[in-house]
Image (cartoon, helix red, strand yellow):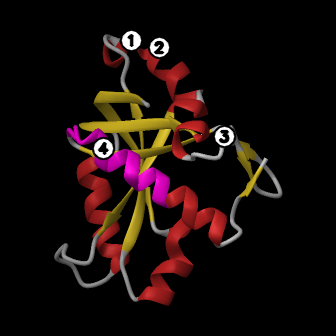
Amino acid sequence: MEKTQGKAKVLSISAEPLQDYNEENDTQRVVMSFQYVTEGAEDNDLQALIEGLSHNTTRTVILDLASLEGENLKKKIASLKSKLEGNTIVCTTYVASISELNDEGHASVKTDERTYASLNRSYVGKFDDENAVLQSLKDRLQRSIDNADFEWA
């Protein structure tokens, strides 16, 4: 399993990808996307531009805004965006290959549109419990197989 931990620039915060989930579960979750900052990139406009255009380095994490003060979700998002977007925070991301996550020897899973060779999990801040992450990713893979969201490729 691969681990990346370091400074990350907050790119966006949006409830749109979780709109159905929020309505079905009466929650206020949002997706925060971020990108790890290469050392010196914050001082190099061209490097920052190119990194920003490289989608394979963008990660996401789900934030639960239920406990955040505010009248409604839109106002909470606006407040959070004004504080976070464009700023740098510390994040941790783990990436595990599908073969690490199952005992049957499968190397990938697929949906109707895409094949995945790995799954990842990101956290805001420093997170060093690799065993918990590995178990979480194994559970996520098994749920996705059980729910027919993924099938073995």
Q: Determine which of the numbered discs, if any, sits on residue 44 in the image.
A: 1
Evaluate if marks 2 and 1 touch, with contact meaning CB atoms under 8 Å apart: yes
Is mark 2 in CB contact (under 8 Å) with mark 4? no
Q: Which residue lies furthest to the right in this view?
A: 112
Location of residue 78 with respect to 34 vertically, above or below? below
Total marks placed = 4
Q: Point out residue 102 in the picture as x, y percentages from the top left corner.
A: 57, 47
Q: Distance between the residues labelled 2 and 1?
A: 5 Å
Compare marks 2 and 4 and give the one earlier in the sequence: 2
Q: Name the residue under label 3.
A: 105
Q: Nearer the viewer, residue 122 or 47?
A: 122
- Residue at the spot of label 4: 131
Q: Can residue 143 be seen in this view?
A: yes
Asked if the residue under mark 3 is in contact with the one under mark 1, i.e. CB atoms within 8 Å, the reply is no
Looking at the image, tell me whether mark 4 or mark 1 is earlier in sequence order: 1
Where is residue 149, by image quadrant? Answer: bottom right
Q: Which of marks 3 and 4 is nearer the N terminus?
A: 3
Give the main secondary structure of the magenta stretch. helix
Three-letter amino acid code at the position of disc 2: Gln
| Furthest residue toward front | 104
Q: How far apart are marks 3 and 2 (CA)?
A: 40 Å
Q: Label 2: which residue?
A: 47
Numbered range of the magenta stretch: 126-139
User: Do the CB atoms of the residues marked 3 and 4 lie less than 8 Å apart?
Assistant: no
Give the secondary structure at mark 3: loop
